[in-house]
Image (cartoon, coloured by chain):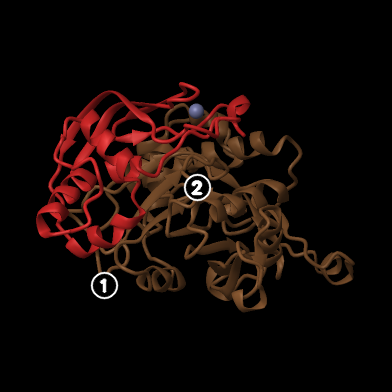
């Protein structure tokens, strides 16, 4: 099996513990290596950040190595994005994200399910490749609710990206799709829980290998020195989204917060809060959705 | 990093702590001044969304008394410069932020604030 293969997974334990073991602990271990492979901003995200008015403040919920914190490149310093992440090791990298010498970035150690902001404080929020690490539908919905709560009800903008079951050729990942279940299921929108192996490269292993054998999820179980030991493989948990699932999640989150989904012209009652879905699509193996808040 | 711009957004989120949970109070802080590029448009546009009183208080707690108690109506360059300094050039590197209501302590170490809660504190 190549390390690009994806393994079917089931969330058997409590979702929180599942994430602790199969997401948080792994990112702290692979932070440096992971970060060295994640530097290109996705075009839709770059475009979203380029379109923001000067003086806006935003949250990058699940910022990872902070690759979106220096954006937009064409107007650096015109907006300020604060990075939130669960991995402290990734945050240390995020603090100085960007070209050298880079100004210090604002980062906060926290959980995307937390709510440590005054309500509506941000002008925008992005959540890129993060919500798919949450191990239940309810938790993914809460994460979306947190985004809706932290931005301005009158003008807040939100962009969410998650991993799709529908993978493109470029990603070279081999996903064991259950086509039968997908086509015959009466429940049309069901994603898939998987483990995605992260293989450390040998040069990274030399620097990293210490006493972390407990987390090795690959076949390596030897106590040989780093010279002969195959690089450890860490299986990260993902929930791969089905077509339509992200939109459904957004609708459920909005409903829970009594936020309408539509355009303000459709509503008359003063005080109504709503969101308009301005973009909803698939790009490079991911689903994304862009939302704009309104209030009448 | 915790700069005052971030502090102006953070609130306590311990389960049930919903009143007087903003702003958090600084405790035993160490600060570091770091020059940042001045962008007057950024500061001017940001102004309406700040909690002014909280900002003035927080600035005092870290030893800066340059801001007027009331939000100025005129935003000339002098005001914008002062705001720029207070919001973006004072870095709190060590210490803590404490909730006035429930007294929860959010530690700051190496410039990173810890807003994680233990399981029983999550709302
Ligand atoms: Zn509190």
User: Residue A80: x, y in percent?
Assistant: 32, 56
Q: CA distance from mark 1 to mark 2?
A: 30 Å
> Which residue, given by chain and number where applicable, does mark 1 sit on?
A74
Return the disc, 1 or 2, that comes first in the chain's sequence. Answer: 1
Q: Secondary structure at mark 1?
A: loop
- Mark 1 Cα within 10 Å, few/some/many (few <14, many 20+)? few
* Horizontal side of residue A187 vs B118, given as left or right: right
Which residue is found at the position 60% from the left and 40% from the top?
A: A22
- Looking at the rendered image, the disc whose residue lies closer to the viewer, 1 or 2, is 2
Which residue is found at the position 47% from the left and 59% from the top?
A: A126
Q: Residue furthest left?
A: B78
- For residue B90, above or below residue A241: above
- For residue A49, above or below residue B29: below
State which quarter of the image contains the C terminus of chain B: top right
User: Residue A149: x, y in percent?
Assistant: 55, 51
Chain A appears in which tint? Answer: brown
* Residue A110 seen in the current view: yes
- For residue B108, above or below residue B38: above
* Horizontal side of residue A62 vs A267, given as left or right: left
- For residue B84, above or below residue B94: below
* Horizontal side of residue A259 vs B4, given as left or right: right
Q: Residue furthest bottom?
A: A265
Marks 1 and 2: CB-CB under 8 Å? no
User: Residue A40: x, y in percent?
Assistant: 38, 65
> Which residue, given by chain and number where applicable, does mark 2 sit on?
A119
* Horizontal side of residue A175 vs A179, given as left or right: left
The quarter of the picture where residue A255 lies is bottom right
State which quarter of the image contains the N terminus of chain B: top left
Chain B appears in which tint? Answer: red
User: Residue A84: x, y in percent?
Assistant: 43, 46
- Ligand 1 under 8 Å from disc 1 Cβ: no
């Amino acid at each position: 099996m190549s390390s690009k293969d994806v393994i079917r997974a089931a969330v058997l334990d409590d979702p929180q513990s599942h994430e602790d073991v199969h997401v948080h602990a792994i990112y702290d271990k692979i932070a440096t290596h992971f970060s060295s492979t994640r530097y290109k901003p996705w075009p839709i995200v770059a475009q979203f950040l380029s379109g923001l008015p000067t003086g806006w403040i935003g949250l990058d919920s699940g910022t990872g190595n902070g690759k979106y914190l220096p954006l937009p490149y064409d107007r650096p310093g015109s907006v300020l994005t604060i990075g939130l992440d669960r991995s402290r090791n990734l945050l240390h990298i995020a603090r100085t994200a960007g070209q050298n010498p880079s100004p210090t970035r604002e980062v906060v150690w926290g959980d995307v399910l937390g709510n440590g902001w005054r309500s509506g404080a941000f002008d925008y929020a992005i959540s890129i490749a993060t919500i798919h690490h949450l191990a239940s539908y309810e938790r993914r919905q809460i994460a979306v609710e947190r985004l809706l709560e932290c931005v301005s009800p009158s003008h807040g903008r939100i962009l969410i990206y998650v991993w799709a079951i529908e993978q493109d050729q470029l990603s070279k990942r081999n996903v064991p799709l259950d086509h039968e279940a997908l086509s015959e299921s009466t429940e049309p929108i069901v994603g898939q829980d998987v483990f995605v192996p992260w293989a450390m490269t040998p040069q990274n292993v030399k620097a990293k290998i210490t006493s972390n054998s407990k987390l090795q999820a690959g076949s390596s179980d030897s106590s040989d020195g780093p010279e002969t030991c195959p690089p450890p493989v860490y299986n990260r948990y993902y929930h791969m989204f089905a077509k339509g699932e992200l939109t459904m999640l957004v609708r459920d989150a909005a409903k829970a917060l009594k936020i309408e989904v539509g355009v303000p012209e459709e509503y008359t009652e003063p005080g109504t809060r709503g969101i308009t879905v301005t973009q909803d699509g698939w790009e490079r193996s991911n689903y994304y959705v862009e939302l704009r808040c309104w209030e009448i | 990093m915790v700069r005052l711009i971030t502090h102006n957004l953070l609130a306590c989120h311990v389960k049930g702590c919903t009143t007087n949970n903003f702003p958090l109070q600084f405790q035993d802080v160490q600060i570091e001044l770091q020059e940042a590029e001045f962008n007057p448009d950024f500061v001017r546009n940001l102004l309406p969304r700040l909690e002014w009183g909280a900002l003035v208080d927080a600035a005092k707690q870290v030893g800066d008394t340059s801001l007027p108690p009331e939000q100025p109506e005129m935003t000339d360059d002098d005001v914008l410069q002062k705001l720029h300094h207070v919001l973006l050039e004072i870095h709190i590197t060590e210490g803590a932020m404490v909730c006035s209501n429930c007294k929860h302590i959010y530690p700051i170490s190496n410039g990173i604030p810890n807003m994680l809660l233990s399981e029983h504190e999550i709302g």
